Image (cartoon, grey):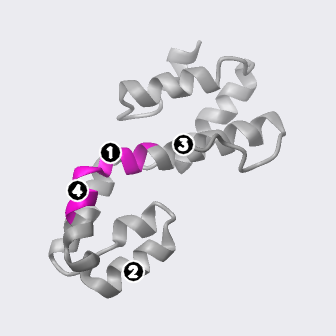
Amino acid sequence: MINNYMQYLPNIDAEEMAMLQGLTADLDPTQLQQFVSMYSARRKDAQTILLTCLLGFIGISGIHRFILDQVGMGILYLLTGGLCAIGTIVDLINYRKLTLEYNQRQAYQVVATVKGGAVGMYPVQ
């Protein structure tokens, strides 16, 4: 059943798929459908983060941080030129990790919402 719903989530790598399968294992079909629709609206694509990170070399640093809801870091990158381009280079290397961490937070929040639990409860890594 889960594979039918996961076809609606494009560009999911194996690590994200495993995380989603673990999170949604105890959801009933209605909850799973709600989860997929909410999660697909909230998740970010790694290629989008990569492209916006590359904008840091043109002079608009930190756009990817704003997209990942890291407003403070986005402002810092914007004002310092991506921390003198060093932070932008590090983010270019770690863009998949940044995206996965954001998507994990969103998945935990969506599962909590679908189950009717407290929003914002996710494990600290």
Q: Which residue is mark 1?
A: 96
The earlier-in-sequence mark between 4 and 3 is: 4
Residue range highlighted in magenta? 89-100
List x then y, in percent, for residue 25.
65, 17
Query: Label 4 amino acid?
Result: Leu
Q: Which residue is mark 2?
A: 76
Asked which quadrant contains residue 30, the reply is: top right
Q: Is residue 63 visible?
A: yes
Query: Label 2 amino acid?
Result: Leu
Q: Quadrant of the N terminus?
A: top right
Q: Residues within 10 Å of mark 2 (few under 14, many from 20)?
A: some
Query: Which mark is nearer the camera, 1 or 3?
Result: 3
Per the rendering, the mark at residue 125 is 3
Q: Is residue 18 magenta?
A: no
Q: Which residue is mark 4?
A: 92
Between the C-alphas of marks 4 and 3, the distance is 21 Å
Q: Is residue 7 visible?
A: no
Between the C-alphas of marks 2 and 4, the distance is 17 Å
Which residue, as the protein is rendered here, is positioned at the far bottom? Answer: 79
Query: Label 1 amino acid?
Result: Arg
Q: Residues within 10 Å of mark 4 (few under 14, many from 20)?
A: some
